Image (cartoon, grey):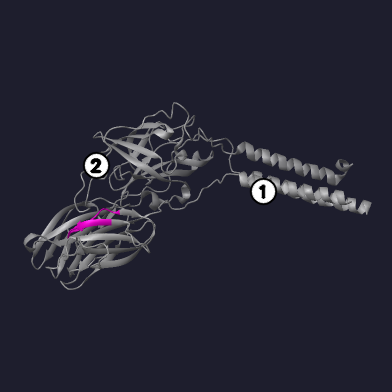
């Protein structure tokens, strides 16, 4: 019989190794549940009403009225409705992150949302136990809408133009933080592989948006 | 004989196909680092005293109908930046009210790159001479600084010195002796609440211009009422004044799947299994061939 011969045993063992490797691969695969469209209840988050302020200036050489500080962020499609804390830089020059995983924060060194330039908003994907405010950020797609409410009661609307994942050691600083001629938005969280040894994710997810005229 | 050979070959094919299917099914662990910028930006304007106003047309290359028309653009106007797809364009300006098919007063071709930002304005060097110029902005400011460029668009002032009341130790004069139609390079200026001053043979004009790090400005010297000197401030672009270092630590792993999640070791294991299987399969076939043949 085939199986009793040494070569047959090796053959069967090879198949077993393949099966084992496949099982290991499948079991450790990151599950990214397809949650679009969002589950009922979450999707019911209303689109904000109230004044949406378009870029006010007709001419670049007339000074634009000052834009009020951002106070909250609303992304109906992924169930985000959070107040915005303010963030600066750490001593080592890295970006501060919110002290809790339940809120997002605006980097005060970036333009205010709705002013010319990229407004930077950061939130956690998760805590040590469960989802954070930006858990579903990577589900956003070009064309989706994001709203930022400001201290003066106005709301500015952004349209997602791109969603990118970057390894943190190849973070594209210029593309994310660099100057833009129009009012833009960057939403940043973690993503990719979690390195249990360092306690950090290896990648960042960046959502790019531009103000809706 | 033939049957055995066929079966073994089929085994190999099956295993190979399964392996390939697996590879295809594995999601990419690191997505592309492709730039998200897919548009360029153009600001059209009129910095020529004659003719004024003009009708401004932007054409995509090879297209006879304009992509953008701005009527009655007066001297001293810079319109907001318009996002356009990268590619070749032409800009034509006609005396206001002229037919769209009439010969333009000014015209120029420009190539828009993704992420590029351009000011397109007519500039005169004299009452008789001038051209439509394409000014390419560099938006990458040195950390903690702003860029300031000066356009001398005042025909009445043959030589203009443009001064910034910047902090001590910095060059205060951005440009000296600038003739009409001159476009200065972009100067890196520290952030701060500065006063810009343009001094020409016919007078002095000044403007308070607060600069924030990461901003890109254009200061335009224009001729005001009674030949006075005016400064116009244009905010071309703004970024984070001090860009944070590296990536952002925004997760603690509570929703990450356990294990490394890196498929490479498993792929190596599968590959080894396939090698062993193929090698033993080949040996099996040879034995059978020897035994039966």
Circle 2 marks a residue in which chain? Answer: A
Q: Are marks 2 and 1 on the same chain?
A: no
Q: Which quadrant: the C terminus of chain B?
A: bottom right
- At 9% from the left and 68% from the top, the residue drawn is B201
Circle 2 sits in a helix, a strand or a loop, which is it? loop
* Residue B159 in magenta stretch: no
- At 19% from the left and 71% from the top, the residue drawn is B125
Q: Residue farthest to the left?
A: B226
Q: Is residue B69 above or below residue B245?
A: below
Q: Which residue is mark 1?
A: B20
**Distance of label 2 from label 1 (alpha carbons):** 55 Å
Circle 1 marks a residue in which chain? Answer: B
Whole-percent x and y of residue A88? 33, 41
Mark linked to residue A67: 2
Q: Nearer the viewer, residue B103 or B285?
A: B103
What's drawn in magenta, residue-wise? B69-81
Indicate the quadrant where residue B157 lies.
Answer: bottom left
Whole-percent x and y of residue A157? 33, 40
């Amino acid at each position: 019989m085939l199986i009793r011969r040494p070569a047959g045993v090796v053959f069967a063992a090879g198949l077993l190794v393949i099966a084992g490797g496949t099982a290991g691969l499948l079991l450790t695969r990151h599950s990214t549940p397809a949650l679009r469209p969002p589950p009922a209840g979450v999707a019911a988050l209303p689109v904000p009403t109230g004044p949406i302020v378009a870029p006010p200036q007709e001419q670049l050489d007339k000074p634009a009225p000052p834009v009020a500080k951002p106070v909250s962020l609303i992304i109906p499609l992924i169930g985000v409705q959070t107040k915005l804390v303010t963030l600066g830089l750490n001593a080592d020059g890295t970006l501060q992150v919110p002290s809790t995983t339940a809120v997002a924060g605006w980097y005060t060194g970036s333009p205010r949302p709705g002013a010319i330039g990229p407004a930077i908003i950061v939130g956690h994907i998760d805590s040590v136990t469960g989802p954070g405010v930006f858990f579903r950020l990577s589900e956003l797609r070009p064309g989706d809408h994001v709203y930022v409410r400001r201290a003066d009661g106005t709301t500015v609307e952004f349209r997602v133009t791109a969603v990118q994942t970057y390894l943190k050691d190849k973070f594209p600083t210029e593309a994310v933080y660099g100057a833009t001629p129009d009012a833009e938005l960057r939403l940043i969280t973690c993503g990719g592989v979690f390195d249990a040894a360092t306690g950090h994710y290896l990648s960042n997810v960046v959502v790019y948006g531009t103000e809706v005229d | 004989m033939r049957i055995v050979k066929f079966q073994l070959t089929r085994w190999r094919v099956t295993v190979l196909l399964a392996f390939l299917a697996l590879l295809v099914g594995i999601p990419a662990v690191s997505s592309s680092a492709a730039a998200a910028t897919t548009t360029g930006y153009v600001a059209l304007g009129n910095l020529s005293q004659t003719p004024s106003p003009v009708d401004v047309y932007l054409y995509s290359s090879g297209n006879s109908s304009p992509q953008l028309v701005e009527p009655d653009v007066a001297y001293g106007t810079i319109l907001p930046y318009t996002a356009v797809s990268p590619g070749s364009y032409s800009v034509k300006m006609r005396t206001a009210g002229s037919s769209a098919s009439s010969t333009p007063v000014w015209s120029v071709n420009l190539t828009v790159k993704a992420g590029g930002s351009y000011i397109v304005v007519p500039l005169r060097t004299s009452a008789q001479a001038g051209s439509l110029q394409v000014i390419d902005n560099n938006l990458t400011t040195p950390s903690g600084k702003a860029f300031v460029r000066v356009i001398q668009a005042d025909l009445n002032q043959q030589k203009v010195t443009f001064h910034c009341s910047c902090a001590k130790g910095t060059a205060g004069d951005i440009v000296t002796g600038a003739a009409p139609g001159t476009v200065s390079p972009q100067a890196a200026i520290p952030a701060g609440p500065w006063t810009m001053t343009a001094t020409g043979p016919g007078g002095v004009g000044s403007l308070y211009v607060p600069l924030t790090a990461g901003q890109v400005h254009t200061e335009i010297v224009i001729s005001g009422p009674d030949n006075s000197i005016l400064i116009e401030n244009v905010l071309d672009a703004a970024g984070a004044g001090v860009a944070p270092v590296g990536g952002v630590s925004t997760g603690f792993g509570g929703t990450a799947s356990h294990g490394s999640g890196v498929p490479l070791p498993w792929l190596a294991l599968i590959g080894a299994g396939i090698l062993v299987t193929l090698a033993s399969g080949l040996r099996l076939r040879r034995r059978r061939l020897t035994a039966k043949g």
